[in-house]
Image (cartoon, rainbow, N blue to C red):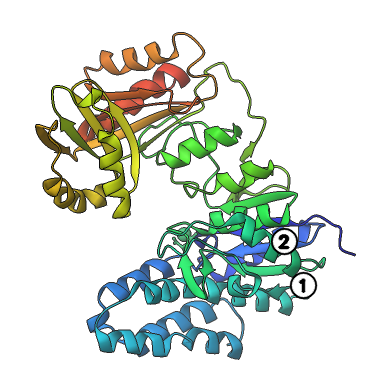
């Protein structure tokens, strides 16, 4: 039989903390009636541990690290598994070599980090097999999850991968797959932090899955980050654009690019909290083509502090053709991602990630652009995004956002609306970020505000 649609199911590192978590996963898996591709992240904390090991490679005690990994992974099983042990030790030579040269080339970095996921997939396979479930392990290098080759933060080449995956996963079997990486020219390339979500949705795309189910340890999307606003509410339904914008602008629940593949093929994406799981088909958040229209219009607020603004000032900069192109191509050549651009007659404001500031400073100091009189950097800022389909069409929504903020005497530094039809975003001083979120949240969703901060 080769015609049953598959479901892609992903479990995150937060679902893999202790032995009992595996029995939860098992009981969920048993409820599915269709062939599955289970995508899995590294055990909780392992990716950070590996990052840390590579950051201090000169002082790395390779044997100790491997013993530590072995005790973490083997602790999930009743008896130590030999195949898993071999897998864990597969990176030994790589680590020793890296230590010897005292440097971590990108291709080694990606290979070492992907190891956490590869240990998880083998662990799950054994666990499932021992309990009578038929699962095979399949690795991205075997089935061909092809990427653009960019280390640390690759993009999946969906069309190329689709052809390979369709052939590989033809049969109605169950598979378990490590997330977080794909391959390019035989090299492992990571998909960015939290990349297993993106692995799952990419595989969903390639197999034209019936659905992609992501399991987390939080209850789906909320109206705002509960760390910033007390009275947040769950968001049951989002359309693809809304979910993509919220993730792009900092909602930590989903990888930035994860929505893209499923959006292209109109595959529903469900988010469940494994800790409060009730039944399949009843997730906390459903992301699909049909969102829902709510009275508030705004579905959720997100924010990011990982942001800096470079302001190119000059009395005429907004009118000089080609200027922005020149800036963008210089940054592009150095792989600096421009998150957004806001221009006016007298300034071009380029939004970048905080981590690119030093690089950009070097580049801009070398740029010779006659019309630019000064270049300023701002890093003490936060971007707030209000997301909801119809936000730009419904009169008064923007006005409500900004009057809520101004009632609290918070200065809005820059506004952008229209780049996406579901988002209005603006910048505030970092110290005002929580107060701004609280003010807008109260205006649209009611409830209490924090008293301090
Ligand atoms: N383990 C990786 C990370 O922590 C990938 C993932 O969790 O999705 O970023
Ligand atoms: Mg993770």
For disc 2, the marked residue is 29
- Vertical position of residue 77 compared to residue 335: above or below: below
Whether 445 is drawn above or below 329: the answer is above
| Rendering quarter of residue 141 | bottom right
Residue 3 or residue 251, whichever sits in front: 3
Considering depth in this image, is 350 or 129 the residue closer to the camera? Answer: 350
Q: Earlier in the sequence, mark 2 or mark 1?
A: 2
Q: Quadrant of the N terminus?
A: bottom right
Quarter of the picture containing the C terminus is: top left
Residue at the (67%, 30%) spot, across then down: 290
Specify whether 240 is left or right of 45.
right
Residue 449 visible in the displayed image: no
Q: What is the CA distance from the residue labelled 2 to the residue labelled 1?
A: 9 Å
Disc 1 on helix, strand or loop?
A: loop
Instruction: Pinpoint residue 130: horizontal percent, then vertical percent.
Output: 72, 79
Image height of 173 relative to 392, above or below: below
């Amino acid at each position: 039989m080769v015609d049953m649609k598959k479901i892609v199911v992903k479990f995150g590192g937060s679902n893999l903390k202790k032995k009992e978590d595996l029995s939860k996963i098992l009981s969920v898996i048993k409820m599915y009636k269709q062939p599955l591709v289970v995508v899995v992240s590294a055990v909780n904390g392992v990716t950070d541990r590996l990052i840390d090991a590579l950051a201090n490679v000169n002082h790395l005690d390779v044997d100790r690290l491997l013993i530590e990994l072995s005790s973490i992974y083997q602790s999930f099983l009743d008896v130590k598994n030999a195949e898993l042990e071999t897998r864990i030790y597969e990176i030994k030579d790589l680590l020793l070599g890296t230590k010897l040269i005292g440097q971590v080339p990108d291709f080694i970095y990606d290979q070492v980090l992907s190891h956490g996921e590869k240990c998880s997939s083998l662990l799950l396979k054994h666990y499932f097999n021992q309990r009578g479930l038929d699962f095979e392990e399949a690795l991205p290098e075997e089935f061909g999850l092809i990427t653009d080759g960019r280390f640390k933060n690759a993009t999946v080449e969906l069309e190329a991968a689709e052809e390979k995956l369709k052939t590989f996963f033809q049969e109605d079997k169950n598979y378990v797959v490590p997330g977080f990486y794909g391959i390019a020219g035989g090299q492992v390339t990571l998909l960015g932090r939290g990349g297993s979500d993106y692995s799952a949705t990419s595989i969903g795309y390639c197999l034209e899955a019936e659905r992609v189910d992501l399991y987390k340890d939080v209850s789906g999307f909320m109206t705002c980050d509960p760390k910033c606003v007390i009275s947040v509410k769950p968001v049951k339904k989002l359309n693809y654009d809304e979910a993509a914008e919220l993730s792009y602008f900092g909602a930590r629940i989903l990888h930035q690019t994860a929505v893209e593949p499923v959006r292209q093929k109109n595959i529903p994406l469900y988010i469940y909290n494994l800790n409060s799981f009730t039944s399949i088909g009843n997730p906390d958040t459903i992301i699909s083509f049909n969102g829902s229209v709510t009275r508030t219009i705004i579905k959720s607020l997100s924010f990011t502090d990982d942001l800096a603004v470079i302001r190119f000032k000059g009395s005429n900069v907004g009118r000089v053709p080609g200027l922005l192109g020149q800036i963008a191509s210089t940054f592009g050549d150095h792989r600096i991602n421009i998150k957004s651009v806001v221009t006016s007659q007298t300034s071009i404001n380029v939004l970048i990630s905080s981590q690119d500031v030093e690089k950009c400073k070097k580049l801009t100091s070398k740029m010779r652009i006659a019309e630019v009189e000064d270049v300023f950097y701002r890093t003490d800022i936060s971007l707030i995004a209000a997301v909801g389909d119809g936000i730009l069409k419904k009169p008064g929504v923007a006005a409500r956002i900004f009057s809520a903020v101004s009632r609290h005497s918070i200065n809005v530094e820059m506004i952008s609306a229209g780049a996406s039809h579901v988002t209005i975003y603006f910048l505030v001083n970092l110290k005002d970020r929580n107060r701004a979120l609280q003010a807008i949240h109260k205006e649209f969703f009611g409830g209490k505000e924090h008293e301090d901060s």
